[in-house]
Amino acid sequence: MITTKKIPYAIEKPLRYYLMEYGREIKMPITYMDLTRYVNAIPVYDKNDRDTLWLTVFYDQDDMKHIHESLKKMYAILRANGDLSVIRHLNIDRIDLCMYGNTQPFRVRIVNLKNDNFDYFYIKRADASRVYGLELEHILSPNQISFFTNGDTLIEEHIVGMPGDLFVRDHLYDKSINKIRLAKEFVKFNERCFIRLLGDMHSCNYVVEIIPDFEDVHYRIRAIDFDQQCYDGRRKIYMPQYYKQNNPIIKMGMEVMTPESRIQYQKEERAMMAVRLQASRYRIKELGDAVMKDSIAPPEHVDQLKTELTQYYKEKEFLNCRGMGDIVKTSLKVLLKMV
């Protein structure tokens, strides 16, 4: 369990150059700091009158028009490659602030006035760990992610799905749940997180997609918090199976899945990650070169993690790692050996 708040890391030149090369660094009409000029805030409650720990913020009239128009342009950048014609009938309905998050994100709710359909996107401080995490998710997982940076500002799409904690609380014990398919997806999710070293995946930090199939339903678990990308020194931090909030899913999986099935699903996910890795080998090499030149974790975390991974994999190559970038690179090398 993570007990201390992670240190934020600024985006340094190697990562900045990578983001520019792959079109992630762009000019934006508004920055994170612009949104901090709010003059009032009220709590946001859910439909059951529970405090969500988000605040709806308000701005002076002089600021509000500029901020709303700029946010609509940012949505066009995120969703339509900058085509401003898509924002003609859009309206900024609400701007919320999360005070307890590492990057204190702003969440923007945007509404289509023609049909009342709405969407969300986020504006955050650009923490290097999170940017590495988003990019690794985009390359190595089955999920594409739209995000952009501009200096110290990060704009990020909303990842649709039911928050994991709500899914466990309200739906895990429904008779309609396909326990085997859900357990299989959790095994695969656990494997993805561990190999690319994404930590803190308790049930509040991922969502569950429920996808109807022609005979049943399919599940996909998607990470939504990437702040703990290769930061902690403890191996188990990168394995969702060790978080107590995930115990109900673990228990269900133990009831319906044999050890042989679990190993099979682990192998399947490793094979798919290896395919994605090979398909994006030049991009992942350039990202790896950037992270190897970067410092995104304390030296004591690096030493602890490379020792624990050496013991786990029985691979002495981890002991030669000098930073978290080296450890991620070695982890991906081990992946290719395993398939």
Image (spheres, helix red, strand yellow):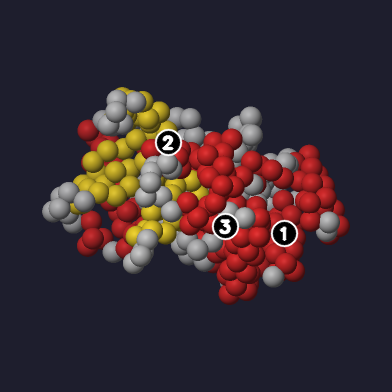
- Amino acid type shown at disc 3: Lys
Rendered view: 225 above or below 21 = above
Task: State how far apart marks 1 and 3 are (Cα).
Answer: 16 Å
Decide which of tag 2 and tag 1 comes sooner along the chain.
2
Q: Residue 75: percent from the left, percent from the top?
A: 32, 54
Element class at badge 1: helix
Decide which of tag 2 and tag 3 comes sooner along the chain.
2
Task: Decide if residue 332 is on the left or right side of residue 156.
Answer: right
Q: On the rendered image, what quadrant is the N terminus found in?
A: top right
Label 2: which residue? 169
Task: Decide if residue 25 is on the left or right side of residue 321.
Answer: left
Q: Residue at x 66, y 67 (%)?
A: 285
Element class at badge 2: helix
Q: Residue 97: percent from the left, percent from the top?
A: 38, 34
Q: On the rendered image, what quadrant is the C terminus found in?
A: bottom right
Rendered view: 111 above or below 24 = above
Q: Residue 157: percent from the left, percent from the top?
A: 40, 52
Tag of residue 331: 1
Q: In this orientation, which residue lies closer to the viewer: 327 or 295?
A: 327
Q: Nearer the viewer, mark 2 or mark 1?
A: 2
Q: In this orientation, which residue lies closer to the viewer: 90 or 204?
A: 204
Q: In this orientation, which residue lies closer to the viewer: 237 or 190?
A: 190
Task: State how far apart marks 2 and 1 are (Cα).
Answer: 34 Å
> Disc 1, disc 3: CB below 8 Å?
no
- Amino acid type shown at disc 2: Arg
Q: Residue 169: percent from the left, percent from the top?
A: 42, 36
Element class at badge 3: helix
Tag of residue 188: 3
Disc count in the image?
3
Q: Label 1 crowding class (10 Å Cα cut-off): few <14, some 14-19, many 20+? A: many
- Amino acid type shown at disc 1: Ser
**In the rendered image, is residue 225 in sight?**
no
